[in-house]
Amino acid sequence: MENISITSNQSQDGADIQISVQDVYFQYETTDDAPPKEVLHGISLDIHKGEFIALLGHNGSGKSTVAKHMNAILLPSGGKVYVAGMDTCDETLLTDIRRTVGMVFQNPDNQLVATIVEEDVAFGPENLGVPSEEIRRIVDESLKAVGMYEYRRHAPHKLSGGQKQRVAIAGIIAMRPKCIVFDEPTAMLDPRGRQEVMDAIDNLVRNLGITVVLITHYMDEAAKADRVIIINDGKLLMEGKPNEVFSHIDMLREHHLDVPQATELAQYLRSMGYDIPEDVLTPEECARAILNARTGEKSA
Amino acid sequence: MISDITIGQFMPGKSFIHKLDPRMKIILMTAIIIFIFLAKNLFSMGAMVAFVVLAILFSRIPLKMYFKGLKAIWFLVFFTAALNMLYIKGEHVVFQYKALTIYEEALWQSGFIAIRLVMIVVISSMLTYTTSPTDLTAAIERLLAPLKLFRLPVHELAMMMTIALRFIPTLLEETEKIMNAQKARGADLESGGVIKRAKALIPILIPLFISSFRRAFELAIAMDCRCYTGGKGRTRLNVLKYRFRDIFAFLLIGGLCYGIIYLNTLAPSLVR
């Protein structure tokens, strides 16, 4: 398997590393005689403070498994995972690790425990033993951060998918984590819900300074990240800025991955001979590039 | 629609009874139910009925909701009343026809029993109508707390109750989806006898069970991620606090109970 590494401009000093996955191997325990299935084959990656990372890979590539190592839901069979310098294998640090790295899952229904929105958001801080008046403040803040404050007295089952997922996010924010791992948070949502959740995630990264690791199938969501990491067959395949990674269209195709639609269109136009840059990501950039190409044509 | 079923049937409101502390409500409702049985003559029973009627008015819950609660027990009320009327022997015969003899004592007894049953149902529906499920579980957790001494996992029980309440609507929705999916595949759920219809439920129950286990597994991981480690060292968003109105209600019910005992002494008991 080829390993292409694209140098990123991130500073490499260890002080600002939030999560460090070091040469991790992982195999699922299987029953009886079947040989254990190895899912991760020596993967290493660093996640820096305040970064927005998109983790990509096709089904069964091991991306979810990597994510579950980031807050000690799974422990590596070989290698080490450090969260803010804490070894995830150390059981005494479990609570500290989990309040540092929160996790949001795919199905919003299966993450909400209480019958009222605000009670659910309070669940994390309640577990951590935060005093009541403090919890009230944190809950209100967290709900405002995802725009669900008006729904604080509602029952979760009456909310839409996007709203439920935002409540789930608020429940994680309420634990004041440094980093949140999102395991395909938009996979079960309609386009509107997806947009709501992406806006909430955007707000976390840009305004609250929370490190975000987003696992997704949607390349348009990945395009918003600071850095894209592509995992294939339990190994790191590629990493770099979105525009760098997505310019390798052929290689992504080879591994059954898409590129953002705008990038695809730009690539197609390039192959037709138009003067359009390789690193187009968003529809806006694409429109501008096409406009530039047209005006260039006219002046020529 | 199945999803119309609401467990507990909480009806939000701002009445005095709504605002009472749920622990106090449970304690007082229990006391009232006990004293409903202790009221033994017309004075004390009259006072009790008057109190319950006033409580109904103060709860500001539509009267038809109480009738809805009573619908299920009409049969039980009539049945027990009738049995008592036929079988209780006394001294004063009111009515006699061949082997059928009805005594005055039996009439009183069955009348009292009918009124007692109706009032118990009214009072307990009042508790669920005016208290949100969350408050109810919190109150039960607090009231049962002393049982921790006997190693009863009180917090865990309350947590299970909360999660059950949380997932009832979700699972009802899912049941409906599975039913529709099976109908779309030609499942016949409506026709046939009891056994045939029970058999037709299997293709609905199995997917429902499997998905419930999957949900439970995912929920457990999500709870782990939110640092849930059981009841130890846990705090609460909403702490239950007794307020002035709770003391007022306590004194009021205390007065009522004392009144019942006093009124019982004014006239001979009509029931055993």
Image (cartoon, rainbow, N blue to C red):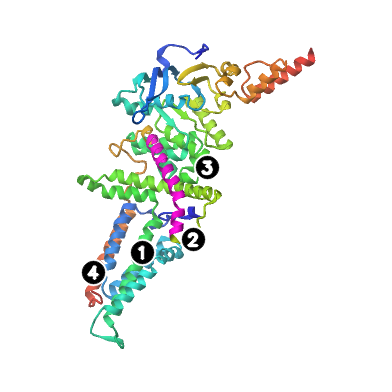
| Subunit ID for the residue under disc 1 | B
Q: What residue type is labelled 4?
A: Ile
Which numbered disc, 3 or 4, marks the residue closer to the eye?
3
**Front residue of A175 and B247:** A175
Tell me residue A221's x, y (percent): 56, 27
Q: What residue type is labelled 2?
A: Gly
Which numbered disc, 4 or 1, marks the residue closer to the eye?
1
- Residues at discs 3 and 4 both on one chain: no
| Subunit ID for the residue under disc 3 | A
Disc number for residue B121? 1
**B209 in relation to A184, above or below:** below
CA–CA distance in space, label 3 to label 2: 38 Å
Q: What element carries label 4?
A: helix
**Front residue of A58 and A16:** A58
Disc number for residue B192? 2
Magenta range = B195-222
CA–CA distance in space, label 4 to label 1: 22 Å
Tell me residue A63's x, y (percent): 46, 25
Tell me residue B65's x, y (percent): 44, 62
- Of the numbered discs 4 and 1, the one sitting upstream in the chain is 1
Residue depicted at 56% across the width and 49% down the height: B184
- Residues at discs 2 and 1 both on one chain: yes
